[in-house]
Image (spheres, helix red, strand yellow):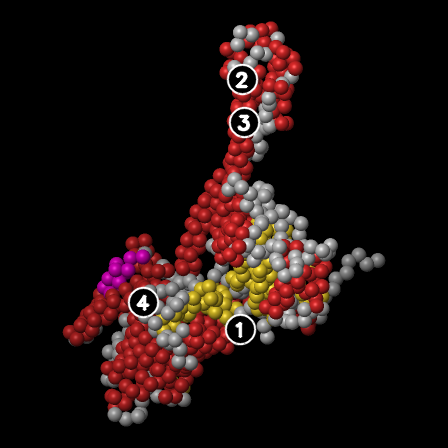
Amino acid sequence: MISRMEIFPTSKQSRWSERVIDFKNFRAVIRRIDTSNIVMGVLAFLISRSTIMEGLTPFGIAFISAYFIKYGSTHTIPLFASLGILSVHGLDSYQYISVIWFIFFTFKILNPKFKENVIKTAIFSALSLVLLKSLYLVINDYYIYDLILTAFEGIVVFTLTYILAYSIPTIDTTFNRVFSSEEVICGAIMLALAVSGLDSMSIFGISIKNVIGITIVMFFAYNKGPSIGAVVGITIGVITSMSQISLPFVISIYGFSGLLSGLFKEVGKFGSCLGFLLGNIIMSFYIDGSMETMLKNKEIAVSIVAFILVTKLIKGLGSKVVIGISDRSQIEEAYSNRVKDMTYKRLTEISQVFEELGQTFRRVSDRKKIVEQKDISKLIDDVANEVCSKCSLCRFCWESDFYSTYQSMFEILGTIETRGGILPSMMPEIFQKRCTKTDEIAQKINYIFDIYRLDYKWENKILESRQLVSQQLEGMSKVIKDLASEIYNDIRFKRDVEKEIYAGLKRNKINVDKVVVTEDKEDGFEIYLEIKTRSGDDIIDKTTKIVSEIVGIELTSNKYCSSTKCEDKRIKFKLIKANRYGAITKVSRVDKGFNNVSGDNYTFGERNNNYFAVISDGMGVGHKAKQESDITISLLEKFLEAGFDKELALKTINSVLVLKSADEMLATIDMSIADLYTGKTQFIKIGSAPTFIKRKNKVQIINSHSLPVGILRDVDIQVYEEDVEDGDFIIMISDGILDANYDEDNKEKWLANVIHDIESVNPQTIADKIMEAALEACGGTANDDMTVLVTKIWKRR
């Protein structure tokens, strides 16, 4: 019997497993490698190799001192610096290496005294070099000139320690931010020292030092502009040719070429490359008088290739490498988030205040005024005090026979409530026989009851007004809360797209001044442009076409976000995604009222990719009906333009009509809102006539059975949704069109047949034919105001 089975791998399987394990371990080791330390080590090695005045190498000492200030003492960087100096001086490098390690061990012991103190560290490093090297000179044979050179090296170490302390953090990829011009220049000096450390290395006659130097100049000129390009060019020229006789010429070539490269950056990467090439040719010709350039053309060609590859690499890494090229830095994002948090918190607090106010008004108006027993008793007491107290029979009626008298008064109040008033003859018979002042009681009780009834009516009106105010306060709370939520929309600025648009417009001879491209998390984007021009709309159309070709998406100008031409001949406008659908509305109307005053009112237009059409019918005809519908349409337009929620806007309009006057103000609302990007359409109907959708050979009817606005405190909003198609017609009418055919029982079917028989695809023709059919049905004379809105929807090709 087998109690245990062991499986032994073959030798081939075992070797494969070991390789897998080793490969996994290798990847784990790679992940643990700190790229920042590698970059720092390479810089320490190259900068330590940089020489000045034929053999002086103090730069490595300045670099490790600056590194210790920011990151503390570590043995890795001094080791790389020692290797760099050793590769230049060989065994004679002990003078510099001993200074490096002396500074290292001093920092190890006295780190708290030097940490983050640039001046102290710079002085200490300079004195360490001067004292130790002077000691070596005193021990050996020396000249006064050697001591002067040592003092000069101390000054260099002091100066560069201060400079490199600001440049080293610029290559720390763990903290992405935009750097100041001073930090950029300090970083350029550090890179120039590293390039100088390459010395005379070359491949196929191409100087590696020159290639890297040219690439750095073009890179800074392209990303930071002509001023930084010129400064970096001069810096590269000074440091890389410190030991050469041609120093002034090299400085002028690098500086002027960096300036031109920055000036040509608006044309793009190749523009910057062309600018540097032209600068080299111009300055070389000016200096030497010949077409032979001081920087070889093949070196510039290799540098151009390297420059393009580096810019693409940095873009692919999310712009988190190199000095200050970040599209959106962590510091900027932190500030932006802080502002968002403060704004969101403040708006939320205001929203809560409005919400609490709304709830307070709702609590105090939860019930209508109800007649209670104490109110009836008070009314009867008032009558007794005013009339009965002066009667000689008062004691008999209100003391001896209290219940009988009270019952009679209660019956009198019931009669007043049902008949609106009372006469002595309407009083109970037993009361008439016993009371000697029935006329005075009838007069007084009628008067007091009228006052009480008026108070009761207005108290209920106040309660109703409080409820309406409560709705509006809660609605405002919701609007502010929605606004606060929009604060957190993630808006990104597309710098790369901005550059392409700018360059493309310049190529087409459009004098563009500003380009801003924004994109939100829902992939919606907007392009803001500012152009110097002498013309108007034609330049907007031309620009829209060019930008559409650049971004590869059909765009259109937002007519609600454009300015007229200013005094300085500038025009500002915004481009957005073009809609997939287009819409146009045509109108036909006939007025019944005098002086062509119509109770029907309408509006239509486009806002934020939505197309809306609204028709409102005020009750009746003439000026009163016109006032009702005009208030409704005017308020609705303002609310829609301000971006209010549709339901809140309609409730507010209802409240205004209810509260505006003691007389009833009624109006119907029929609204269609089409999303021109998706084709989804909402139909909102409040007491309105049906809406008809004509689609090819069929007609669809959308009907509602709600009351108009202005009647009840709570408005009944009925919303229907439909997907419109290419070639659809949305037909909205006032009730005068249907009422024109008073002989027809099924008026909706009659009008649907009229619409179906119309063969035209012109919205104005359709509106006119519907109006002709209505006038024909009513004998040519309109019985009510009649309005027809026909909206045609089509798909853009």
Q: Residue furthest bottom?
A: 290
Q: For mark 2, does the 10 Å Cα neighbourhood hold few (<14), some (14 to 19), or many (20 or more) residues?
A: some
Residue at which label 3 appears:
450
Residue 144: numbered disc: none
Q: Amino acid at mark 3?
A: Asp
- Which mark's residue is nearer the viewer, 2 or 3? 2
Q: For mark 4, does the 10 Å Cα neighbourhood hold few (<14), some (14 to 19), or many (20 or more) residues?
A: few
Residue 464 location, quadrant: top right
Residue at which label 4 appears:
181
In the displayed structure image, the side of residue 719 where residue 41 appears, left or right? left
Q: Secondary structure at mark 2?
A: helix
The residue range painted magenta reads 116-128
Residue at which label 2 appears:
440
**Which residue is depicted at the point 61% across and 66% down?**
768
- Which mark's residue is nearer the viewer, 4 or 3? 3
- Which mark's residue is nearer the viewer, 4 or 2? 2
Residue at which label 1 appears:
553
Q: Secondary structure at mark 4?
A: helix
For marks 4 and 3, the one nearer the N-term is: 4
Q: Is-magenta flag for residue 578?
A: no
Count the labels in the image.
4
Residue 166 location, quadrant: bottom left
Q: Amino acid at mark 4?
A: Ser
Q: Are marks 1 and 4 in contact (CB under 8 Å)?
A: no
* Type of secondary structure dominating the magenta stretch: helix
Q: CA distance from mark 1 to mark 3?
A: 73 Å
- Above/below status of 530 relative to 614: below
User: Is residue 779 or residue 326 the one in the foreground?
Assistant: 779
For marks 2 and 1, the one nearer the N-term is: 2
Q: CA distance from mark 2 to mark 1?
A: 88 Å
Q: CA distance from mark 4 to mark 3?
A: 84 Å
Q: CA distance from mark 4 to mark 2?
A: 98 Å
